[in-house]
Amino acid sequence: MANTRLTRTPSSAGSYVINTWSFWVKRGTLSSNQNLFNAYVSSSNKFRIKFTPSDQLEVGYFTGSWDFQIVTNRKFRDTSAWFHIVVAQKANESTATDRIKVYVNGVRETSFATTNFPSANEGSNVINATNATQNIGSSGAPDHYFDGSMSHVHFADGSALAPTVFGSVDSTTGEWKINTAPSFTPGTNGFTILKDGNTITDQSANSNNFSLGGGTITVTKDCPDNVFATLNPLMPLGSNIAYSNGNLTITPGTSDYKTTASSIAVGSGKFYTEFKAVSGHNGSTDVSIGIVGADTFLASTGSKAMSAYTNAFSYGSGGLVKQYNGSTIRTDATYTNGDIIGIAVDMDNLKLYWSKNGTFQNSGNPASGSTGTGAVSIPSGQPYYICATTISSGGVKVFSANFGNGFFGTTAITTNSGNGYAGADGKSKFNYAVPSGYSALSTKGLNI
């Protein structure tokens, strides 16, 4: 939702004392002001729920000074997971700390860096006011856009609800899971949007529809009940990589080599991922796609190309397939702007394959199992991250990854009549046909 803003101005006033907000969110870039909800009259009259530049969660009402403001000690820096955030306001409670309650994944937050709770009956009169614009994903300025994904955004006007309305604990895993059909009274200005898709038409009993105030809304396979891998901004080797599009696009910032890893490592199973060479690529050996052993990657420091790591294997844009000591295993086809490189990792048989635009290199057959037709053999003993190495010398080289969510950057897969191709998980969307038995790197893909 980077630079995307959803807006609505109520036609009649609702409660400013008792309300509930529920969001499922997956973060992208970190360390900046990012609004989830903002009710805005002016810069000195606004209510907001947002992530701070320190990645804490803030709820506050500002009228030139803070009428009330709470900020969590907890930092929200996991870009690989969906968070369920519920903010329940009941300003007429006798106990001050009960007037604003914040829940994350079903558990109430009780540790706060800032604790300026509302006075008795002190709500924000802009939450449901007819002169205030309700904003999802930005401030009212507009700026401070949320960067990431949102799903199942609910607002209950006049009710302070428990998080169990919107989710529950999975009896098998013990994890918090989504309730895809929550039942609640929306009240005058209540709404449900972004439910099971990208519609901003109110799906509650009301007709409190939102408008697209800027940016674009995209449908992704990545959702609260099927979490897909991304590239991990907390774990690059080398600094100054710019991450965008939900941490699926990487742009190098300096001339040093930079390697970034998937947010999920694989130790068993068979997985497929695609990378698109977006811009700056010229068939040189400066960039590569491959895997790095998890123990090696986590223990390394400095800026290095993927081929510099112990237990790393890469396919470079100049066509060279290399192993960890930098020596060349073989030479495959070169690739440049617009080409899509597939990588198939068979951890059950310790084999690795690459494709270019749907054709596996070296006559590879990822379904050949232990035979490993056309494969590179990889050592056992540790899980592997799927990685990309890039560099800015000779032109800034940009990659976009598709771990099965159906996009390269903001461009949706259009092959197979727009349906793309699913992995063995059945819930993914790739540009090219996925080898038999291979899944997307996602929670459903990990559990088939």
Image (cartoon, rainbow, N blue to C red):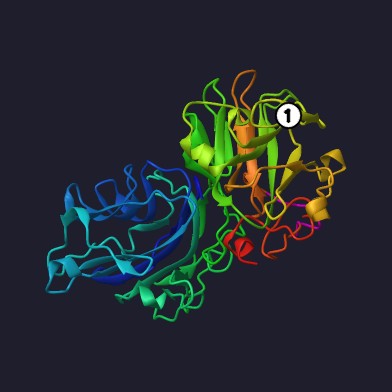
Between residues 358 and 407, which one lies in front from this camera angle?
A: 358
SS at badge 1: loop
Q: Callout 1, which amino acid?
A: Ser
x, y percent for residue 24: 45, 63
> Which range is magenta?
412-420
- Is residue 172 depicted above or below 108 in this figure? below
Q: Is residue 172 visible?
A: yes
Please name the residue that numbered disc 1 is placed on: 317
**Horizontal side, residue 212 vs residue 97: left or right:** right
Q: Quadrant of the C terminus?
A: bottom right
Query: Image quarter for residue 187?
Result: bottom left
Which of the two residues, 403 or 155, is positioned nearer the viewer here?
403
Q: Is residue 360 left or right of residue 202?
A: right
Task: Report the front residue among 426 and 270.
Answer: 270
Q: Is residue 161 magenta?
A: no
Where is residue 151? Give x, y as percent: 50, 63
Residue at 74% from the left image edge and 40% from the top image edge:
341
